[in-house]
Every structure is written in C-alpha cells, then in structure tokens.
Amino acid sequence: MGKRGKRRRVAERPKTKQPAVLGGVIAVAVVGAALGAYSLYGSGAAADEGVTATTRKAVKTGPLSAAEIGMASSTFLKAWQSGDVKGAAAATDDSAAATTTLTGFGKDAHISGVTLTGGKRSGADVPFTVKATVTYKGRTKPLSYTSKLTVVRRAKDGVALVGWKPSVVHPDLQDGDRLVTGAAGNPPVTAIDRHGGELTAAKYPSLGTVLDGLREKYGKTAGGKAGIELRVVRKAAAKGKQKTPDKTLLTLSAGTPGKVQTTLSPTLQAEAEKLVAAKPKASVVLMRPSTGEILAVANSGHGFNTAFQGSLAPGSTMKVITASMLFEKGLASPDKPHPCPKTATYGGWKFHNDDDFEIKNGTFKASFARSCNTAFITQAKKLKDDDLTKQAQQVFGLGLNNWAIGVPSADGSVPVQSAAQMAAELMGQGGVRMNPLNMASVASTVQSGTFHQPYLVAPSVDHRTLAKASRTMSATTLAQLREVMQYTAAAGTAAEAMAGLGPDYGAKTGSAEVDNQKQPNGWFTAWKGDLAGAGVVQQGGHGGSTAGPIVAALLKAGSGA
C-alpha cells in the first residue's frame, strides 16, 4: 500500500505469610561489569563512590549511574527475598500496587523459601532468577523462573527506584492479574485435532494461548477433574472484550483431562508453525470458506495470539471490502476507466500512492491490482461516513463483537469516522483494526459468496450460536470482486507469491504504515479453491514479499488436504 505523506501517517495503535530465607542466607547478587564488586551489604561500588541515602536524594536529573541502579535493585530484591513486603514496595515507584502483588505472592500463591539471584545488568535493566517453593495442602513443588526489573528516576525528586510493573514479580503477570495456588479453576483438557491426534504446545508452540483458551471455555464441561496448580488468574475483561485465559505455571497435582475436538489439521498446523518461524512477528490463519472451519493458526511470537486477537490496521487488504462497496454503489466496475492520480486530497489531507505512481487512462481492475490508493480516495466525496462500516458489518460480519470461535478472538473494527479519517479507512488505515483471522474470513466470504463465521470448535459441542451476516452481495458484485482479486493474483502485486496456484484463486496485498516504525506491516489475504488464508508480518514491509509467501505456501500445502 502506498503512503499518505510523512505528516499524515496514521498510528496503529489477560498480615501475610512471609517467604522464608533459605539457609538463613540472603542470596541476591546484582552483578555486571558496571557494578564491579557491589554487594547487598552496603560495601562495594556504592560505598566506594560515596552514594548514600542522603547524597542520592540530591541527584535530581541525568542518566542513572551504575551505583544507583545497583542500590535500587538490590534494596528491592533484598527486601522481597527476606519477606519484607513493605520495604520492597517502598523501593518501587508505586508502593501501593507493589504491596498488593507482593502480598499475594506469599498469601495467595503460597510461595515461600524465596532465593533471588541477580544477573548482568543491561543499562537500567537488571535480570534475576527466582527460586522458591510452592506448598499447598501438603503438596510441595519447587518453582524456578527468570524475571527482570528496570530502575527509573522518580520525577519529583530524582530518587532511583524500581519501575513497578506486575511482570517484575512474574513475567506472565499483567496489570490486574493475580498469582493463585489452589484447586484449578477449570479441569485440564486434551485438545484433539480434526483427525483425533492430541494437540500440545510442545509439538505446536503457537497453540499455547489457544490451549489455554480451550481449557477456560470447555474445562468444566469436557468431563475432566481439576488438579492443584499455581496459575495466573487474569483480570476481568472490559465490556465487549473477551477475557484472556488464565495460565497454569506449575502443577502440584494433575487433574484428569477432558477432551475437546477442534477443527485444526495436524499437517497444516505443522506447516504454519514452520512458515511463521522463519520471520519475526509473523502470524497466519487458514480456514475453509464453505464451512468456516479453522484449519491452522500460528504466530512466530508465542506470548500473544496476534492471529486471533490482534488489532492492527490492515492496509490495502481492506480494499477488498471497500471495492465491494464501490461496486454495489456503481462507483466502480472492473473494466471501466477509473482515476489513479499521483495524489488525492480529501478532508485536508493529501494522500499518496507508493512512490507517487499514477495510472493514466487505466481501469479500476488495474488500480486494484496495483493497489492504487488514490483510486479509492477520489470516491470518498460520494460516500457517507457510515457506508464502509455498514458494508463490513452487514456483508462481511465484522465489527459486531459477536463471533464465538471457541477461544478468545477479536472481531475487527471499522468505526464510523468522517473527513480525512473516513477516507483513510477506505484503504485500511484510520481507525480500521483487523487481525489475520478477520482478513482470512474476508477472503473466505469472497470465495464462498456468503459469510461463514470462522470457528475452532464446532458449535454442536456446546450448542452456541455462530454469528451471521445480515445480507449477501449480489451475484454481479460478487463476480466483480472475484474478478479483481483473481487479476491481482495473476498479474498484480500478489502475482509472485501466488504463482502456480491458479486459476481458481484470488488475492490482495497490503502494507500498513505505523508511527515510529521504519517498515510498514505487511499483509496478505487470499483464497485457493475451498481454502482461504491471511497473514501479517509486523515491520516486514510490503505484503506481497513478506506475508504473501507464508499464506501462499499454506494454501499450496492445503490444496490436497
């Protein structure tokens, strides 16, 4: 997708029992070349440099020194290890929040015998290892993990303190989350692929969050029995949002798992894992248009399921929805002449094509295939502010927050906007937000002619109702949309990635510019026969060369599945 000019780039935008001291020895040591021989007992670099509580208060501005970082981090870790919650919290820049989390660490999570060992610092960041014991109703298990703290300078007085975040206590904790040990909230589940094989995070790393979601939703109804676990209990979701699943960190006694059947293909899931692993921040989804079954989902980063829950501007892949609207309104037709100037102005913004290219005397099909931004911006003055929102909701089933796929997902967002922001939405910027699941569904709707809500678990398992679209495209509009997507796959920006997959295919590339990113996010959505997929590579560049090969390879792998 082209750019709108540097000044108009649109942003993208889950009384206490105190831990004992093992062996009576404080084992925290914050080490690193810059800290020299600094120790916890007031000697070493801090003492050598004369940094005391009095002199430190006088430091108001400027970069943190090694001694300040060492003193602040050591004070916090020493107090935490000794069970001094009040002292540890006072060593942070948010003592109230720190007190709550650190108190829960001992009281709710039943963690004791804490030993903290610092690692080599990097700037103001200090990594450390936590070793402790979890004990609950006579069951005991060792706990070990690594975390990190960052020392900051408090604005009002310049004092060096630990910048408080729940992730300091455990890297899986976010604001509002709690660590709890006890009977599991939900019994464990064994997730089964479409052919009856077991799905595990060890075999398919991308499925960690998916498996957590399956347990959250089906654990109590799948026939299992809960065990005893240390887990992260997530905060309640905001209205209209799906709660991030709780996460098990340590099992003290295993429960009996129930079974949950999914729609995933083991061969395609394995292929998807391999494809995204080759690029940082890559995500992909493959589904079957005729049914809505999700066949594969993968992310190269396993901490967050961007493929299902991401909220990113989709760039020019959004032009599939926009084009369907223009066809319906008679504002475009594949083979009719259509303007594609170098720039177009609307709402006070000047929008550009990539490298300010233009197509003289060209057709809409040519503009779509080359991803001409101005071909869409020139039509903005003929549209109402809510036209695109209605098209996305009514035809493609997006943005209504009513999808029920079996695990948490985001259903896309196309808010009503006006002036320049409305025009930006036509080409997938502005306030539009999507993820690969949403865009795979868009390609699926074009291939099948009807919106089928994607799903990972069949609705017959729990008798839930799948989302519906309120209307379908006319036969004429659908034929036109398929034509321009087929042409894009054969001779446009998607041709290189889709080579050899035709003729029953269609595709659209995209790139979404993001503030403070040197490279845009690369998007790709396509169908091949009764398969549809979409992917994004964040900070990857143009979608045809980044996300395109991932989606195309998965379509090719699935052609015989």
Image (cartoon, rainbow, N blue to C red):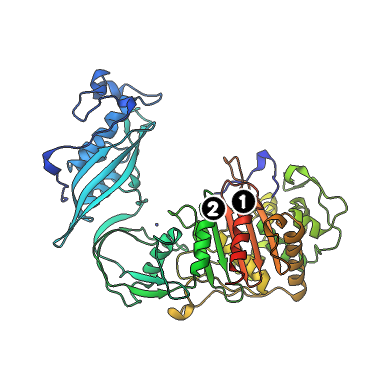
The image quadrant where one finds the C terminus is: bottom right
User: Quick one: label 1, few (<14), some, or many (20+) residues within 10 Å?
Assistant: many
Q: Quadrant of residue 149?
A: top left
Q: Residue placed at 65% from the left, 54% from the top? A: 428
Q: Quadrant of residue 506?
A: bottom right
Tell me the kind of residue under disc 2: Ala
Q: Position of residue 420 (x, y in %)?
A: 69, 49
Q: Nearer the viewer, residue 362 or 195?
A: 195
Residue 383 shows in this picture: no
Q: Position of residue 195 (x, y in %)?
A: 47, 75
Residue 475 shows in this picture: yes
119 above or below 391? Answer: above
Q: Position of residue 325 (x, y in %)?
A: 72, 65
The numbered disc on residue 546 is 1
Q: Residue placed at 56% from the left, 53% from the top? A: 312
The numbered disc on residue 514 is none
- Which sits earlier in the primary sequence, circle 1 or circle 2? 2
Q: Position of residue 39 (x, y in %)?
A: 22, 28
Q: Secondary structure at mark 1?
A: loop
Left or right: residue 410 compared with residue 489 = left
Tell me the kind of residue under disc 1: Thr
Q: Residue placed at 45% from the left, 62% from the top? A: 239
User: Quick one: label 2, few (<14), some, or many (20+) residues within 10 Å?
Assistant: many
Asked if labels 2 and 1 touch by Cβ distance under 8 angstroms, the answer is yes
The residue positioned farthest toward the right in the image shown: 361
The numbered disc on residue 282 is 2
